[in-house]
């Protein structure tokens, strides 16, 4: 059997409902096409609800507690084996175009200033990057100040020499064309939401075009490829060029809302988010714990943000279409396994929350997940079997016929995706070690129930996803649910023990 091409397409912080196939309010015709020509998995979960740990799990097949990049602000060690390294050594042309975020904005990192804006460095960069022989990187979301790398280099090559003016300034700089930041609002809020950056200079079409060029080169060489096309959107800040900024009417947006009293039985930090000036001071040590702040936010502003969020999705969907069309034009579609997903979810008002944080609702942990492989993966199917981003690496390696690779905690889903066997997993685990001074929380999710356990204290959450899909009734202290809680805790511990990777072979009795 010939080795397939493998295309992994990801977004950043996409709510599972931000997909036209499940939500008529948003237009994503090309992602809908993937759903029609492949299988959509409705119960896929991230291994961590922040970028670095989840993305590192995608390429290592390991939980964050094992690969070491346990939260944002940490670095994935370059010596940790990755799926890219295994495929490159097996003769694949490997590439990563777009967002990586395996490294922090400080310390021993290539993704910090002033390296980010050292364009001569990125022009000459040719080292293998976490298993990817070809990389073209972008680090910022929207107009964030940490712009640079290959994206900035490309903008200059296209003649946009004043590109810094369109992004938030670094200390001591000014940016005349950057969107105005909203006053007395979260860091990601923008006053106008429409970004004056020329549409064709945005990183979304850059990623689309560079992905197409990568595929073209691989086809010319006749070499199978593994390409990770990694879009930074729809992660806030909420700003995007026209016509996407005004594509959706804020008045037609329906953000989520809090159910009165729903946080009464949750861990204390849930209710604190609904205070005007909550005291999370002890949690912001030594760095800010995302989401540990007031989530009170005007609904009018949230509707405007949601409209832009949808616009960002439709913008990148156009580029997904460009990539699919290129595969068709080159006659590669039949021989290419495509996986589409995101790194973690997002709050758009659900439970009174915005953006992200240590709140393990489905909105945060559950992710969109689509697989297309013509003639092998059923088309037009919708599956409810549990998937984990942890499984991407071992599944890709099996599809490529690579059998000799380091121990991974994920399991191959290949036979199941092809309808040849029952689901290989009955649960997903999500770790959250976002800040060392706040309670670590880990969730264990089965088809019906989900339980979340904190490192400190006797608090927790238990939800019956069948009878309470909106997760408004925490059953942790419910006497009638004590038996379910006990059984879930036992299965959770057993699953964690079973997932322990044995990194070395035992060769003697002692």
Image (tube, rainbow, N blue to C red):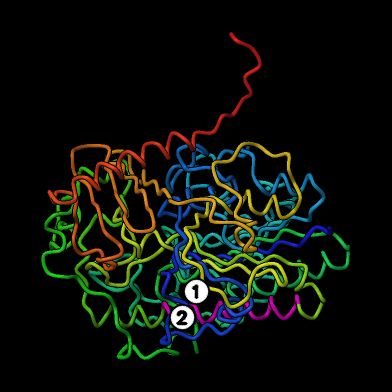
Magenta stretch contains residue 172: no
Question: Viewer-proximal residue, 435 or 418?
Answer: 418
Whole-angstrom CA distance, mark 1 to mark 2, is 8 Å
Q: Residue at x 65, y 37 (%)?
A: 406
Task: Say left or right for 368 vs 482.
Answer: right
Magenta stretch contains residue 325: yes
Establish if 292 lies above or below 108.
below
Q: Are marks 1 and 2 in contact (CB under 8 Å)?
A: yes
- Dot 1: element: helix
Q: Residue at x 81, y 70 (%)?
A: 216
Magenta region, residue range = 309-327
Q: Position of residue 202 (x, y in %)?
A: 57, 76
Residue identifier under label 2: 195
Question: Viewer-proximal residue, 79 or 369?
Answer: 369
Sequence order check, earlier mark of 1 and 2: 1
Q: Position of residue 335 (x, y in %)?
A: 78, 68
Residue identifier under label 1: 166
């Amino acid at each position: 059997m010939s080795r397939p091409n493998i295309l992994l397409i990801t977004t950043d912080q996409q709510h599972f409902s931000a997909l036209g196939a499940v939500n008529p309010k948003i237009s994503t015709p090309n992602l809908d096409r993937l759903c029609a020509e492949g299988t959509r998995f409705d119960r896929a979960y991230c291994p961590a609800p922040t970028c670095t740990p989840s993305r590192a799990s995608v390429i290592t097949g390991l939980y964050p507690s094992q690969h070491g990049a346990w939260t944002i602000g940490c670095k994935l060690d370059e010596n940790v084996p990755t799926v890219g390294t295994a495929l490159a050594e097996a003769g694949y042309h490997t590439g990563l175009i777009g967002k990586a975020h395996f490294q922090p904005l400080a310390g021993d990192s290539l993704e910090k200033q002033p390296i980010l804006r050292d364009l001569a460095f990125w022009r000459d960069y040719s080292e293998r990057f976490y298993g990817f022989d070809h990389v073209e990187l972008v680090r910022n979301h929207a107009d964030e100040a940490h712009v640079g790398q290959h994206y900035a280099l490309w903008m200059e090559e296209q003649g946009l020499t004043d590109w810094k003016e369109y992004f938030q300034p670094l200390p001591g700089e000014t940016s005349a064309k950057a969107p105005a930041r909203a006053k007395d609002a979260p860091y990601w809020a923008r006053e106008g939401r429409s970004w004056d950056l020329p549409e064709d200079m945005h990183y979304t079409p850059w990623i689309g075009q560079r992905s197409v060029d990568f595929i073209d080169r691989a086809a010319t060489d006749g070499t199978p490829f593994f390409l990770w096309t990694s879009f930074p959107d729809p992660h806030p800040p909420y700003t995007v060029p026209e016509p996407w900024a005004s594509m959706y009417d804020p008045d037609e947006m329906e953000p989520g809302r809090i159910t009165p009293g729903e946080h009464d039985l949750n861990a204390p930090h849930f209710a604190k988010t609904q205070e005007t000036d909550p005291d999370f001071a002890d949690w912001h040590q030594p760095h800010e714990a995302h989401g540990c702040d007031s989530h009170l936010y005007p609904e009018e502003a949230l509707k405007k943000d949601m409209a832009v969020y949808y616009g960002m999705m439709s913008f990148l969907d156009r580029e997904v279409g460009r990539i699919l069309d290129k595969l068709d034009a080159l006659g590669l579609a039949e021989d290419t396994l495509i996986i589409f997903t995101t790194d973690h979810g997002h709050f758009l008002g659900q439970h009174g929350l915005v953006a992200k944080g240590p709140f393990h609702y489905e909105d945060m942990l559950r992710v969109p997940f689509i697989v297309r492989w013509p003639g092998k993966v059923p088309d037009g199917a919708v599956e409810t079997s549990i998937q984990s981003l942890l499984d991407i690496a071992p599944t890709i390696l099996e599809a490529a016929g690579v059998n000799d690779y380091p121990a991974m905690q994920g399991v191959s889903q290949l036979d199941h995706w092809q309808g040849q066997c029952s689901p290989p997993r009955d649960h997903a685990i999500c770790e959250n070690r976002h800040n060392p001074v706040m309670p670590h929380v880990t969730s264990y999710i089965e088809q019906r129930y989900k339980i979340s356990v904190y490192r400190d204290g006797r608090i927790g959450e238990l939800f019956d996803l069948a009878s309470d899909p909106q997760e408004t009734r925490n059953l942790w202290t419910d006497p009638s649910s004590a038996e379910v809680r006990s059984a879930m805790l036992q299965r959770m511990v057993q699953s964690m023990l079973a997932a322990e990777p044995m990194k070395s072979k035992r060769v003697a009795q002692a």
